[in-house]
Amino acid sequence: MELRKSDMQDYTSNDGQKSIRPFGFKDKLGYLLGDFGNDFTFLLVSGYLMVFYTDVFGLNAAAVGTLFMLARFWDALTDVLWGRFIDSRKPTKNGKFIPWIGRMSLPVVISCVLLFIPISGMGDGFYLAYAYVTYILYGLMYTAVNIPFGAMAAVISGDSVDRTSLSGWRTMGATSAGIAINTIAPLIVFVDNQLSANRLLMITVVFAILAFACYMGCVKLTKERIVNPERKPGENPSFLNTIKGIGKNLPLISILISSLFFMTCAILVGTINIYLFKNYFGNATIMSIYGLIQGGAIFLAMPTLAPLVKRFGKKEVGLTGLLIAGTIYITLYLIPGINLIPFMVINTIGLVGFSYFNLILWAYVTDALDYQEYLVGSREDGTVYAIFTFTRKIGFALAGGLGGFALAFIGYQSNAVTQSLEVKEGIYMLATLVPGVIYLLVFLLLFFLYPLNKKRTAEFVTNLAERRAERARKE
């Protein structure tokens, strides 16, 4: 059952001792820190592991693409298994999800450091084997933290405004990590426009320590407030019933399909951007300025998010942002021989549009989790959120594979000092036309499939609250 805000001040936990405070700034800050910690490692791996493997280990880009694809497919399966495992556990006095973040935060940061150790003097077979083992290990550890972190947003508060706020704060956490990585890292890890393996390892260790500290802040500051009624032995819903409920959950299905394309695009762009600035524009360190622009776009959009959502609705605001982003990226592709400064200026407009969708995405997800409760009568946030991340990981797998295969297809040469004009033009196409088309495709999918516009969201929230109240009376 759900605890209303007015009830939270006087609510006590099962031991009758500890009062649960109302939702507030601590929860927002704690959730921001959680994604801050997540993306200290995730964005570093997404942005720099491909170039580390090709330019330091000397691995073929297609071989790295195969690794990324296979590892992410496996990781997608473990997401569902881990989410189901968490749902089958009895909540502790600190909640259902928060304890797992505390337990698994140290393993994930250690596994991240292992990825970037610059081992020298070995053959391609060793490097490829080492890459497989450490990359799959990191994926498993990241899953163990990310699944409970993402799922707990739906149980921190049931209020729609609170959840939109959490979605925005989460995105600001990821953005803050992105600013740190995209602004600081290029200035440190590139020497004479070439990647320095030792410097990359050094900055990885620093970011890993910061990630661990952020996870601890998330554990200390956030509170879970929505709890399922305690089930009797043998009452856990079957996975088959969960899948049947998902089959009727149109908001979730539309988000699942869209996320497959969206995540493919996000990771592909993050991977290709290094090659774009390093090879096409000939200045890898300019990524630090680009990182500031990316972060600035998020912080520029954030103050207007709540007023726009209140007036127009979540679906309407997010899709408008996607439409702007897709249009701008295609426009960039159609401008021949564009220089760096005009590229950055025009791209900024697209980044602001994209920021609105990015800020509001997680509010779509929590609404879809609630809709699952509306359909099946109980909360299975871990399992359902894991199925959502399953599609994102498939997108991650496709992006990792496509990034490597695309670089190989356009003729990218590992360890080459310069690339041919055809390769540079191919990199530019991958960084502009491809994301532009994908953003517009996601816009169309959500426009026609996602049913929770402003009016229907209000009706759904009211109906769910009535069901919860009725269930509470019967208990």
Image: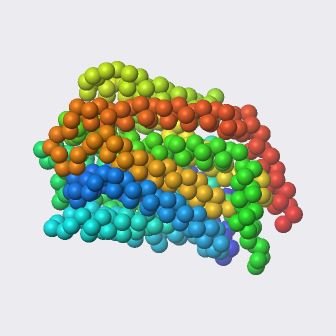
Percent x, y for residue 385? 60, 57
User: Is residue 165 or residue 118 the one in the foreground?
Assistant: 118
Q: Quadrant of the N terminus?
A: bottom right
In the image, farthest residue toward the top:
335
Q: Position of residue 339 (x, y in %)?
A: 25, 24
Residue nearest the observer in this picture, 431 or 450 = 431
Q: Indicate whether 201 appears above or below 345.
A: below
At a point 36% along the width and 32% down the height, the residue shown is 429
Residue at the outermost right position = 474
Q: Position of residue 462 (x, y in %)?
A: 78, 44
Between residues 201 and 273, which one lies in front from this camera angle? 273
Asked if residue 76 is positioned above or below residue 14 in the image, the reply reads above
Q: Say if residue 393 shows up in the picture.
A: yes
Residue 75 placement, left or right of 421: right
| Residue 52 visible in the displayed image | no
Report the label total.
Answer: 0
Left or right: 49 in relation to 97: left
Q: Is residue 373 left or right of residue 337?
A: right
Q: Which residue is found at the position 74% from the left and 37% from the top? A: 456
Task: Locate residue 316: give its quadrant.
Answer: top right
Query: Image quadrant for the C terminus?
Result: bottom right
Q: Position of residue 463 (x, y in %)?
A: 80, 46
**Residue at image coords 23%, 31%:** 421
Residue 187, image quadrant: top left
Scheme by which the image is coloured: rainbow
The residue nearer to you, when weighing 467 against 448, is 448
Residue positioned most to the left:
192
Is residue 131 depicted above or below 289 in this figure? below
